[in-house]
Image: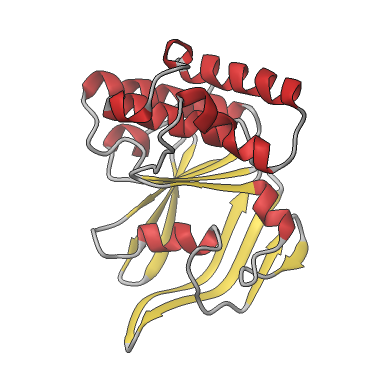
Amino acid sequence: MTAMLEVSGLKKRFGERLLFDIDRLVLRQGAAYTLTGLNGTGKSTLLRILAGLEPAELASVRFLDTPVTLAPYPGCLRDAVVYVHQHPVMFSTSVADNIAYGLKTRGLAADEIARRVDAAMEWAGVGHLRKSKPATLSGGEKQRVALARAHVLEPRLLLLDEPTSNLDGAAREQVIALIPSLVADGRTVVMACHDRDLISLPNVERLKLRDGRLQARQNRLRKVI
């Protein structure tokens, strides 16, 4: 697979403490990764760095083989990368308005916004919640709405921070079921998690933060479809 994002010499410090020192990180187009490690090893921090939300020391960054920076965060990455927080913040409007928000800020035509929102809600199985207020949703419903809000932007790289944490069995399974379709659409997906079912998904590469270093291992049980 072609490399989408290549980062070299990535270091993150908090004062005198070196959180991690990663020689090289390569994320391929249309690939899925789980980012694992003990609490406090920097999983969420690494995702936030890649999303341009957290500063770090960097030797070099390449996006689709073109040199870029992460600070300031360039327009090409703002259009291509979407980060979904473990506890997504939503506006106190309707589900449909929340999903449409990013498209409106990009200035898309109203009919195109409506088409994309309808498709995203159908994909996430939240069409019946169109007019609902986020405050009335369950944890699983909020997570699926957050994924629909990210999906509608058609990102090339999707960064998910603990997408199944604190969800019950049925809600968790519904969220997990959405992941293969993201990869099938050609997106690159990185999921920080402790969820064994996410970690063991077939053809998903495991990136493990341990002692400040990044280790990789590929699952090859069966094809993700």
Q: Position of residue 156 (x, y in %)?
A: 65, 42
x 42%, y 16%: residue = 129
x 40%, y 19%: residue = 132
Camera-nearest residue between 152 and 33: 152
> In the rendered image, which quarter contains the C terminus?
top right
Q: Would you say residue 30 is visible in this rendering? A: no
Q: Position of residue 168 (x, y in %)?
A: 21, 26
In the displayed structure, would residue 181 be above or below residue 188? above
Q: In this rendering, would 165 be left or right of 109?
A: left
- Give residue 21's quadrant in the image: bottom left
Identify the image's colour scheme: rainbow, by chain, secondary structure or one colour. Answer: secondary structure
In the displayed structure, would residue 122 be above or below residue 156? above
x 48%, y 20%: residue = 124
- Give residue 109's quadrant in the image: top right
Q: Position of residue 205 (x, y in %)?
A: 47, 44
In the displayed structure, would residue 63 be above or below residue 194? below
Q: Would you say residue 163 is visible in this rendering? A: yes
> In the rendered image, which quarter contains the N terminus?
top right
Question: Tag count in the figure?
Answer: 0
x 46%, y 57%: residue = 47
Residue lying furthest top in this view? 128
- Give residue 134's quadrant in the image: top left
Residue lying furthest bottom in this view? 16
Q: Position of residue 142 (x, y in %)?
A: 36, 30
